[in-house]
Image (cartoon, rainbow, N blue to C red):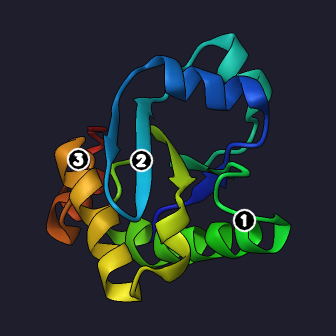
């Protein structure tokens, strides 16, 4: 069963994930993660019924607008490749692009994302995801 991936769009959502202080830095990206809280504020800001939500950001240190957009596109593609099968449901993620995101070989960028997810304990094998979906457990 594919995971529904929503988006973090408002600054307050990004700040909530950053406030959790749960991050991992790799050469290609920075990953921040936070368990979704089902309080009124989160539901008001994200009415979608996504299993998990992801936000993308890059600073001006990465380069001009073209370079920042390219870095975000690469991060979105990496999320598309990995998160459907391997991301833990019920989480909010923020991926921060770095200058090396632009030039990092694709397979190394995917390894960076996988490594960060493993270190933050948000990596799930497909079998674990299937079992979790069947039993109704989250986490």
Measuring 26% from the left and 73% from the top, which residue is drawn there? 111
Residue on which disc 2 sits: 31
Earlier residue among tags 2 and 3 = 2
Give the Cα distance between marks 1 and 2.
Answer: 17 Å
Residue position for label 1:
68
Q: Is residue 137 above or below residue 4?
A: above
Compared to residue 36, the image places residue 83 above or below, namely below
Residue at figure coordinates x 27%, y 64% from the top left: 114
- On residue 88, the disc is none
Spatial distance from mark 3 to mark 1, Cα to Cα? 41 Å
Assign a secondary structure to mark 3.
Answer: helix
**Considering the numbered disc 1 on the image, is that residue within a helix, a strand or a loop?**
helix
Circles 1 and 2 in contact, beta carbons < 8 Å: no
- Name the disc covering residue 135, or none: 3
**Decide: marks 2, 3 in contact (CB < 8 A)?**
no
Q: Quadrant of residue 27?
A: bottom left
């Amino acid at each position: 069963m594919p995971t529904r991936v929503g988006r973090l769009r408002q600054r307050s959502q990004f700040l909530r994930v950053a406030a959790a202080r749960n991050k991992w830095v790799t050469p290609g990206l920075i990953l921040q993660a936070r368990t979704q809280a089902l309080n009124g504020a989160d539901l008001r800001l994200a009415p979608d019924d996504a299993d998990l939500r992801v936000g993308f950001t890059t600073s001006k240190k990465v380069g001009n607008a073209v370079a920042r957009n390219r870095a975000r596109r690469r991060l979105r593609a990496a999320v598309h490749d990995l998160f459907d099968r391997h991301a833990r449901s019920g989480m909010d993620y923020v991926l921060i692009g770095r200058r090396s995101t632009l030039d990092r070989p694709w397979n190394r960028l995917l390894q960076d994302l996988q490594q960060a997810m493993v270190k933050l304990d948000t990596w799930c094998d497909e079998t674990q995801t299937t079992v979790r979906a069947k039993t109704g457990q989250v986490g």
